[in-house]
Image (tube, coloured by chain):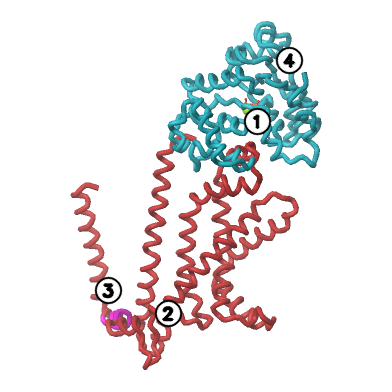
Chain colours: A red, B cyan
Amino acid sequence: MGRRAAVASSLSSAIIVGLIIWFFWRAPNGANVRHFFLDPHSFWINLTGDPSRSLYSILRCFETNVWMFMLCEALVLIFGLGLAWLRLSRTPILAPLRVASAIYTDVFRGIPIILVLFAVGYGVPGMQAGWISQRTPITYACATLVITYSAYVAEVYRAGMNSVPNGQVMAARSLGLSDVQTMRRVILPQAVRNVVPPLLNDFISLQKDTALVGTLGIVEANQAAHVFGAMEFNYTGYTVAALLFLALTIPMTRYTDHLIAKDRRRRLAGGTV
Amino acid sequence: MSAVISAQNVRKRFGDHEVLRGISLDLAEHEVVCLIGASGSGKSTLLRCLNLLETIDEGDIVFRGQSLTDARIDPNLVRRHISIVFQAFNLFPHLSVLDNVMLGPVRALGRSRDEVKVEAMELLERIGLAPRALEFPDRLSGGQQQRVAIVRSLAMKPDVLLLDEVTSALDPTLVGEVLDLLTDLARGGTTMLIATHEMNFARNVADRVVFLHNGEIVESGTPSQIFDQPREAATAAFLSRVN
Ligand SMILES: Nc1ncnc2c1ncn2[C@@H]1O[C@H](COP(=O)(O)OP(=O)(O)OP(=O)(O)O)[C@@H](O)[C@H]1O
Ligand SMILES: [Mg+2]
């Protein structure tokens, strides 16, 4: 971009942003909105918490979201791969599992996650089926995220493996590599490249969906904002929670786009074959 | 002279379409056989059946006296002895040139990296690509890639090398360097079955030329027999079309 173009585009962006702010500022009830959603005093209390008034620090509660999605993402990577592998296996003995894996991915990609959360979070304890019904809400929440997102990620893996040309498999076979060696040395390393951007996209969704688990009574960032809103009749907590999520997801979104762009450049440069 | 590998009355169908209709073909040690025939005559299918990339419907494939249609045979073991090179090279794009050559011996044969590396470098030296051993395949020209693919197969020290139109995807100016390598291998005594559209090359290097037509071997003989005095009308018609 030339210097003039850069100046022009920054200027037009500044004007647009200015207009949007002005619109909300000047809205008939603008002052009210500012008070409810952008109150500096509430903002501060929401960040730090106030034990004397039983108000949570949203920053601390956000830690729950963070470790939840980190744990869940690790598990999803493993279960998703297992599902995809079953789905692509050609061994006749595994045929029932192949069908089961196909049904699983279809079903759990089709159900809104909040319904799965209710089913697991209230249904499983309600069954009174011994050990499995006596877990903590956070366990059920993590189980829900893993169950649902494994289905998405399995499809991502599958598309990635299918994107590796058949000639690669033939070449590996003709060198005498076994099925497992072919998968490990030839298919997976190439699939990973194609898989990383869509995988990161799913992870961004997963991170945001950790905000749903408050429904089970888990105090994470969104639930803490909810408590503050109910007690103080002020919704600035939601703004704080939103900013915390953005602080996490925006770098990841940017990085994903960067990878996608890099990959496109590589493909264009590659040209032949 | 006993055959290294032989096809015995091999039949192969894709659905209703019978692509190979009773092929019998022997390949002796150090023999170079060129397989010619029109597009769709079944050359690729035959080569892929020979190293078990395709299953056959009838007949048998015998490697050093052992039937390969036996259910107890592990195809992966067989393929270490019968290697195939494809028209589309199929080099592994995520591995360096050197690693492409080393993958089979190290992983499939379980040999030590150091030992294999010495041999791989020697092979690359031979095709003049040793200085580019650490580059990725997409940095090489088509001809260079195909020579690496051939060398990758050779690194397995196969008993038989199958080559499927290895120059067809190449720019005409690059065909020569690949054919030179094959000529070199032929002189060195590598047992090869070569499907090709390069008639001059077949005439120069082949011990025997086999003409495949609609899934059948119509005629086979020395290059001069086939090219100069074809006995069958189909052979003559094919040759007049390609020349
Ligand atoms: N996997 C497959 N499924 C169905 N039909 C196939 C398959 N592979 C090959 N065929 C058919 O078998 C016939 C022979 O194909 P083959 O590739 O062996 O011919 P070819 O002699 O190698 O031709 P070319 O010179 O074009 O490479 C063709 O009619 C082709 O359409
Ligand atoms: Mg072919």
- The CB of the residue at mark 4 lies under 8 Å from ligand 1: no
Q: Quadrant of the C terminus of chain B?
A: top right
- For numbered disc 1, what is the local secondary structure? loop
Q: Quadrant of ligand 1?
A: top right
The chain to which mark 2 is attached is A
- For numbered disc 2, what is the local secondary structure? helix
What residue sits right under mark 3 in the picture? A24
- The CB of the residue at mark 3 lies under 8 Å from ligand 1: no
Identify residue type, mark 2: Cys
The chain to which mark 1 is attached is B
Q: Which mark is residue A61?
A: 2
* Residue under disc 3 on the same chain as residue under disc 1: no
Whichever of labels 3 and 2 marks the residue nearer the N terminus, that label is 3
- Nearer to us of marks 4 and 2 is 2
Q: Residues within 10 Å of mark 1 (few under 14, many from 20)?
A: some
What residue sits right under mark 4 in the picture? B219
Q: Quadrant of the N terminus of chain B?
A: top right
**Which residue extends farthest bottom?**
A52
Q: Which residues are magenta?
A: A31-38
Identify residue type, mark 3: Phe
- For numbered disc 3, what is the local secondary structure? helix
